[in-house]
Amino acid sequence: EVGGPGSDAVIPCRGWAGSKYGNRRIPSTKDRSGVDPGHFHHLPADKMRNCPVDTKTFTCLNSTPPGDCSQCDLFGLPDWNSELPEVQDFLSLHLKELHSIGVTMLRIDAASYMKPTELSKMLNQVPWDYVFQEWWAGIPSPSRTRYVGAYRDIFFGRQLNTLLVLEEASSLPRLLNITYGLEGLD
């Protein structure tokens, strides 16, 4: 059927292995249920749109509640509604598949925008060797580190990269002030 639920017009993108996705949809397969726009955070009156995360300040001016970026789209990428049990099941199945093919460590991108309760429910179903949360400044609560994984402040990583590329290695002690510690290092 042209333009039907699984058509290229509705789900226009293909992954590197040929899997279809797009428009906040992933079609069903023999092994799992599909995903539709209701599985993502969205504006109350429009399931295809959502509040954005400002890419310069990493704040969410139009979020509900105000300033809570955990339900907004970062860089225009749809944000999973991980509070829904079916979304947790979908993502948990994917994590289990990754582990079954030999993936033992994870880097969680933009972890500061994910709620730790839902994230830990999904992650802790698999015996990971190491989980690394990318963090956007500030220090997460100790319970988040305990139940989700270690973290690194992305801004510290940028400082380190700049120093190593543009300056001499002798400048490292300036960046790594062990006497006072550094926010973002675990």
Image (cartoon, grey):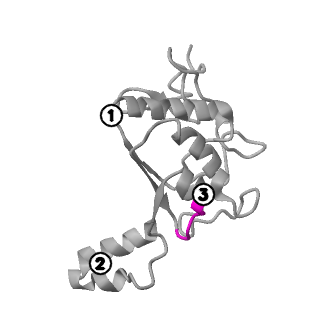
* Residue displayed at 67% across by 44% down: 41
| Cα distance between the residues tagged 2 and 3 | 32 Å
**Mark 1 vs 3, N-terminal side:** 1
Could you say which disc has been placed on residue 154 in the image? Answer: none
Picture quadrant where residue 167 is located: bottom left
Under circle 1, the secondary element is loop
Q: Circle 3 is placed at which residue position?
A: 143
Q: Is residue 118 left or right of residue 148?
A: right
| Cα distance between the residues tagged 1 and 3 | 28 Å
The x and y percentages for residue 82 are 63, 41
Q: Nearer the viewer, mark 2 or mark 3?
A: 3
Q: Circle 1 is placed at which residue position?
A: 102
Under circle 2, the secondary element is helix
Q: Is residue 114 left or right of residue 162?
A: right
* Residue displayed at 44% across by 69% down: 185
Few, some or many residues within 10 Å of mark 1 (<14, 14–19, 20+)? few
Please state, as top left, top right, bottom left or bottom right, where the N terminus lies in the image: top right
Q: Which residues are magenta?
A: 137-143
In front here: 6 or 106? 106
Could you say which disc has been placed on residue 163 in the image? Answer: 2
